[in-house]
Amino acid sequence: PASSGKTFLGHPSGLAILFMTEMWERFSYYGMRALLVVYLIAGGPDAKPGSQGGGLAMPEATSVAIYSVYVAMVYLLAMPGGWFGDRVWGPRKTVAIAASVIMAGHLVLAIPGKPTFFVGLALVAMGSGLLKANISTMVGHLYDGPKDPRRDGGFTLFYIGINVGAFAAPLVIGTVGQKYNWHLGFAIAAIGMGIGLIIFLLGTRHLNAKSSQVPTPLTVAERNSWLKKGLIWLAIAAVFYGIVIGTGVYTINWALVPIALLGLFIPIFVLARIKRDKELTETEQTKVSGYIWFFIAAAVFWMIFDQGGSTMSTFAEKKTADNVFGFDFPSTWFQSVNSLWVVALAPVFAAVWLALARRNREPSTTVKFAGAMVLVGLSFVVFALPMSMASDGTKVSPMWLIAIYGIQTVGELCLSPVGLSLTTKMAPAKYASQMMGVWFLAVTAGDCVMTLLITAGADLNGIGVMLGQAAAAILAGIGIWLNRKKIIGLMGDVR
Ligand code: GLN
């Protein structure tokens, strides 16, 4: 139901607004993310010799763990984000508030210092969580039902918008931050989010009316009970950290490990609760069982994939030649490579799926997921090569990283847009809008496993650890492929 009748590349005109809002949000998100690990290690023992100081001078392992927890929290908070959309403000208002919080977070990051860094990071994580699930749900609202044939195409376009923003961000924010001033880089991220917010506010009339409704408003009694529970947990955490800090035993692991455990426990708990919900019909319950397969696959996938901004980022900074044909470029530019691949390959993928579908030969979602797992695993098998070549201090060719990101992107396109669309189709009616948040919990679970590995002392730059992860992904992919008949059976009418 596009109200005005105008369309955007054959899609409801609201898609253009959501496309641009998310493009700018991702611009700010990925721009800051490109700077994150390099900023944390800058000026410290693990920084590249001769690089710009002024960072937080942290060890590399701690920096990567902070990065992983941060990304995990962004996606964990998508869950309460969906809840706010459903029960408190409606998706539209939630997105507007979220964008403001994100902007505030980047502005706080623009103020130098450790305390402002952590406060800013928390604000960005909170805002991004609130925004991500709601904006994706709103894309779903633009199409009449699961049967609208434009739906998958709409999500593919939306995914391109994400990656146009993610592509430009490291080139602008990365360059300014890494070459001139970290905090100016963060300030530009705030400006980007500001532009996105303005576009969103000006364009809301193009959105589906459903996006402004609060489908199941919170009752006063419920609100009070949530507030009470929240305050109790806050008090427990305050007492706990009061003791830990007061007795002087506090190290950053006291923050990282509990959050990572929570990030692993919550996804399991949430899925178990949905699966056991007695109000679901039998078909819905079977679908949830099928969904769990995809969820686990996605968790392993993101665990490896998200190291594109950590393990692969420090590798780019320290072990890759940053001079090609006499042209010097900042290492954060490597953070654009994945998005460049997405923008280049997504249309190809859409065309190939369509051509195969015409001949009735489109691979099932299950086979696509299995392929994605094998590919992401292979990418780390390949990564082990330049990693060992660089162990004697040789700088390797940038082509290695470009190829590794390329392999991962092919995997991503088999899994990520397909997963978004699948989630909106497999969701039990009762969880229709919360389900997007559940999908993003796979990222949380994957990144929290990573955090726990690091805090347990695993060396992510070690060949053994790298090949271990690769083996886990490839085996999981093979497992899914072997069980494809069973999984397809669980999915019912969803293809
Ligand atoms: N790159 C995509 C985005 O930022 C997907 C990330 C994800 O789902 N983990 O939206």
Image: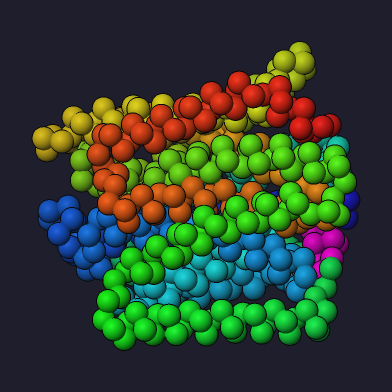
Residue shown at the point (78%, 39%) measured from the top left: 286
| Front-lying residue, 302 or 4 | 302
In the rendered view, tell whether residue 204 sits above or below residue 307. Answer: below
Where in the figure is residue 437, as x and y percent of width and height?
66, 56
The quadrant of the image that shows the C terminus is top right
Residue 146 seen by the camera:
yes
Where in the figure is residue 272, as x and y percent of width and height?
68, 52
The magenta span reads: 207-215
Asked whether, in this view, residue 75 is left or right of residue 155, the answer is left
| Front-lying residue, 235 or 323 | 235
Examine the image and state in which quarter residue 174 appears.
bottom left
Residue shown at the point (44%, 33%) measured from the top left: 472
**Extreme-top residue of the structure:** 359
Where in the figure is residue 68, as x and y percent of width and height?
41, 55
**Scheme of colours in the image:** rainbow
Query: So how many labels did they put on this image?
Result: 0
In the rendered view, tell whether residue 412 sits above or below residue 474. Answer: below
In the rendered view, tell whether residue 135 sits above or below residue 111. Answer: above
Asked whether, in this view, residue 487 is left or right of residue 209, the answer is left
Asked whether, in this view, residue 206 is left or right of residue 184, the answer is right
Residue 20 seen by the camera:
no
Q: Is residue 264 magenta?
A: no
Asked whether, in this view, residue 429 is left or right of residue 359, the answer is right
Residue shown at the point (30%, 75%) measured from the top left: 250
Where in the figure is residue 137, as x and y percent of width and height?
73, 54
Residue shown at the point (77%, 70%) measured from the top left: 87
| Front-lying residue, 174 or 452 | 452
